[in-house]
Image (tube, rainbow, N blue to C red):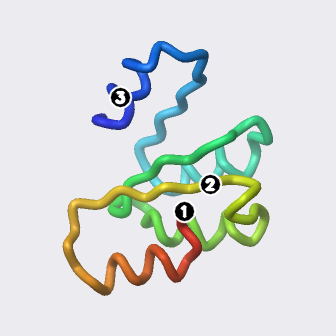
């Protein structure tokens, strides 16, 4: 929600898609060629952000589709996993 509010504050021409679980997010990411950036939570239901990220990276490089994962976790293992899965 914070990222959504921040993007709205920019008042830029942005198409924002909000998905409530990892499976829906993955489906949108894999089937919408117009995406320029993905902002995602680590702890999504049905499929974690890292699981989504690993699948997306099979199709898109870090340069082709930047993916930023937010988390409230301070776990070193979580953070290491995010970067190891090629988040931006």
Mark closest to the chain's N terminus, 2 or 1? 2
Horizontal arrangement in the rendering, residue 73 relative to residue 4 (left or right): left
Residue at figure coordinates x 33%, y 78% from the top left: 78
Disc 3 packing (10 Å; few <14; some 14–19; many ≥20): few
Residue at figure coordinates x 55%, y 77% from the top left: 85
Q: Is residue 66 above or below residue 51?
A: above
Mark closest to the chain's N terminus, 1 or 3? 3
Q: Is residue 78 above or below residue 11?
A: below
Kindly report the distance in space between the C-alpha atoms of the residues bearing marks 1 and 3.
19 Å
Secondary element at tag 2: loop
Tag 2 and tag 1, C-beta contact below 8 Å:
yes
Tag 1 and tag 3, C-beta contact below 8 Å:
no
Secondary element at tag 1: loop
Question: Which residue in the protein does label 2 denote?
Answer: 66
Q: Is residue 61 above or below residue 33?
A: below
Mark closest to the chain's N terminus, 3 or 2? 3
């Amino acid at each position: 929600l914070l990222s959504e509010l921040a993007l709205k504050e920019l008042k830029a021409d942005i198409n924002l898609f909000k998905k409530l679980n990892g499976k829906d997010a993955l489906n949108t990411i894999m089937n919408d060629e117009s995406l320029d950036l993905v902002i995602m939570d680590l702890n999504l239901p049905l499929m974690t952000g890292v699981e989504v990220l690993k699948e997306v990276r099979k199709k898109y490089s870090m340069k082709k589709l930047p993916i930023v994962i937010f988390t409230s976790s301070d776990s070193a293992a979580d953070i290491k996993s995010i970067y190891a899965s090629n988040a931006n």
